[in-house]
Image (tube, helix red, strand yellow):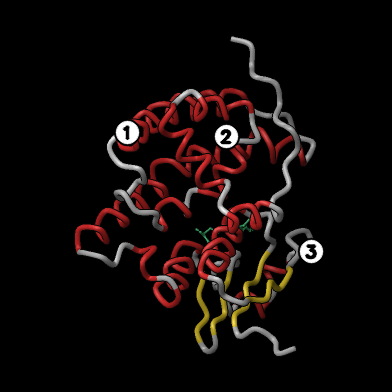
Amino acid sequence: MATPAVKVYGWAISPFVSRALLALEEAGVDYELVPMSRQAGDHHRPEHLARNPFGKVPVLEDGDLTLFESRAIARHVLRKHKPELLGTGSLEQVAMVDIWLEVEAHQLSPLVLAIVLECIVAPFYGRERNQAIVDENVEKLKNVLEVYEARLSQSKYLAGDFLSLAELSHFTMMHYLMATEYATLVEELPHVSAWWEGLATRPAAKKVAEFMPVGTRAPKKQE
Ligand SMILES: N[C@@H](CCC(=O)N[C@@H](CS)C(=O)NCC(=O)O)C(=O)O
């Protein structure tokens, strides 16, 4: 069997790597995941620094093109194979997708990452979680999710009434949030909750979720 022309380098448990994989899965692209070990420091080796001078994963190789940054990778994959997920119908659609991609990258994901690092990653490495960091980010996330609730009560998806990369880009980080007791922040908001259900049950999302195993959710924190 021929080797796929598209390669992704990294560890798929990372929400950044899996963001790239989700775009490939949604677009139906045949790709090879080239496993790397964070523990062994594979990302600091010269051959990887030649692919990404920042020493991070994911990296995507598509023929002669080598790309890093998960959102840039996802955009490239969809631009090439499934442009309708970037809102190609009109200038307004494209602009709305761009807005909600920026919101995901700068408003929601940094807060979710901080919570996930404390609630999932810290215990995994035998470190106690810093509840002050969690609480601070949970308070901010509540406000951000209220904006999502208002938006999703007006349109089925973030950029409008069409599914786009704006949704997909949320999946991997939120997948981890939903494995913490703070999943209730989403579950308590009917429109956000329905939106999340729709996203998480997509076949491509389910496939990528297999790369990101998480234990059963911890019991809800007592107020
Ligand atoms: N903004 C980058 C972030 C990439 C990133 O932080 N990747 C992590 C994956 S766990 C990494 O490579 N960490 C290794 C390190 O920082 O040493 C993206 O979206 O691709």
Q: Which residue is drawn at 69% across and 41% down?
A: 121
Q: Between 119 and 81, which is closer to the camera in this rendering?
A: 81
State which tag comes first along the sequence, 3 or 1.
3
The picture places residue 162, in percent across and down from the top left corner, at 34, 53
Q: Which of marks 2 and 1 is in front?
A: 1
The answer to which image quadrant residue 52 occupies is bottom right
Query: Residue most toward the left?
Result: 91
**Relative horizontal placement of residue 23, taking residue 126 as reference (left or right):** left
**Relative horizontal placement of residue 157, taking residue 13 as reference (left or right):** left
Q: Residue at x 78, y 58 (%)?
A: 39
Q: What residue is shown with label 1?
A: 153
The picture places residue 102, in percent across and down from the top left corner, at 35, 51
Q: Which of marks 3 and 1 is in front?
A: 1
State which tag comes first along the sequence, 2 or 3.
3
Say which element carries label 1: loop
Q: What residue is shown with label 2?
A: 115
Label placed on residue 40: 3
Q: Residue at x 49, y 65 (%)?
A: 69
Q: Quadrant location of ligand 1?
A: bottom right
